[in-house]
Image: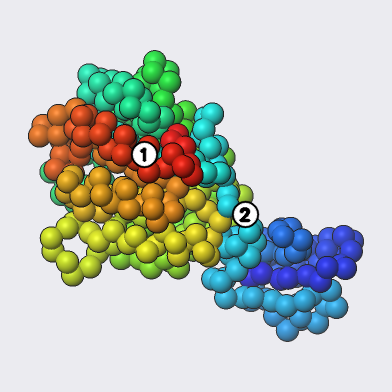
Amino acid sequence: MFVILKSDVENREIEKFLTGLKKTYNADARLVVKNDKKIIVIFENNLKIDVGLLKSFDFVDYIDDSGELMGLVSRFFKSDDTMISIGNKIVGEGNFCVISGPCSVESEQQIYAIAKRIKMAGCGLLRGGAFKPRTSPYSFQGLRRRGIELLLEVKRAIGLCVVSELTDLKYLDLFSDIDVIQVGARNMQNFEMLRQLGRCDKPIILKRGISNTIREWLLSAEYILSGGNDNVILCERGIRTYEPLTRNTLDISAIPMVKKISHLPIIIDPSHATGRKWMVAPLSKAAVVAGADGVMIEVHNSPSRALSDGKQSLDLDEFDNLMKNIKALVKFSKKII
């Protein structure tokens, strides 16, 4: 619930109002000041709040209790684009973020070989799955703890920031030195996980669920922001449609739509969207033109031997060529990070 206050409200009135909410309704509420607007955001309460009573206060302008149109993710709260720091890099502010690496961390030799080449190509963010949620229980599930250790070894040795997917909150402590935590499509509506990630200070990549609307996706991001973590990067990775020729359908239209209604940065994942590596390059270039803040691309040193998603992974030479094309597209308006 959002209680929008009149501009001339005094601080003592706000403090008294917040105290009353806590005492009467056991409500978790805080004051947010955005775009010269003073807004009280009410998160949780054990009793139903009397909206009519809240409206009776002279300093209350109006109330939105839908929780959907005026969230912390919206441009109502923040008109300027959010910029997110990852190491010494900034996502947003005219930068185009390229995150690349294997679907799964498979071995020390594999992850080092990939990391060295993507850095040479100009990519500063390494992705790699340590915990892999797979449709079949018999598929490769990742190296788990050892996968995280290898990513951190590469981070220290080569100087790349690292991104990896958290599949269960019980593993959160292992991610203390991971630069960016990814929430996969399967966990987009794992609200307990989102609440917990709202209490940490790490950047979060939130992937869109395969059957979720943009509104549902943004409301999932709202869980993270409402906990105090503003560092959310949205990732469009394709939605399930009736089209059988691709794994999913990449919703390019989500890029300008999100840009219109939200201040959060948005990237795309053309690898998971299509499941076909020959489509990764044209869709990556389309994302640049559509206004995306970056791409997440699967790269493998030997895709034919990959333990997961080899068919959608670029080899190292293909990635080099794609980076050249992306640089040519963004050089007039953005820069690669």
Determine whether the residue tagged by mark 1 lies in a helix, strand or loop: helix
Q: Which mark is residue 151?
A: none
- Residue 235, image x, y percentages: 39, 51
Give the residue displayed 57% in from the left and 63% down from the top.
74
Amino acid marked by disc 1: Ala
Q: Nearer the viewer, residue 241 or 327?
A: 327
Residue 52 in the figure: left or right of residue 239: right
Determine whether the residue tagged by mark 2 lies in a helix, strand or loop: loop
Q: Quadrant of residue 116?
A: top left
Give the residue displayed 76% in from the left and 61% down from the top.
36
Amino acid marked by disc 2: Asp
Q: Nearer the viewer, residue 253 or 100?
A: 253
For disc 2, the neighbor class at 10 Å (few under 14, some 14 to 19, many from 20) is: few
Q: Which residue position is annotated with label 1?
A: 328
Which dot, 2 or 1, sits closer to the camera? Answer: 1
Above or below, comparing residue 254 to residue 182 in the picture: below
- Quadrant where the image shows the C terminus: top left
Q: Which residue position is annotated with label 2?
A: 80
Q: Earlier in the sequence, mark 2 or mark 1?
A: 2
Give the residue displayed 69% in from the left and 76% down from the top.
63
- Is any atom of residue 193 visible in this view? no
Residue 26 in the figure: left or right of residue 145: right
- Residue 12, image x, y percentages: 89, 61
CA distance for labels 2 and 1: 27 Å
* Count of numbered circles on the image: 2
Give the residue displayed 85% in from the left and 78% down from the top.
58
- Residue 275, image x, y percentages: 18, 50
Q: Quadrant of residue 114?
A: top left
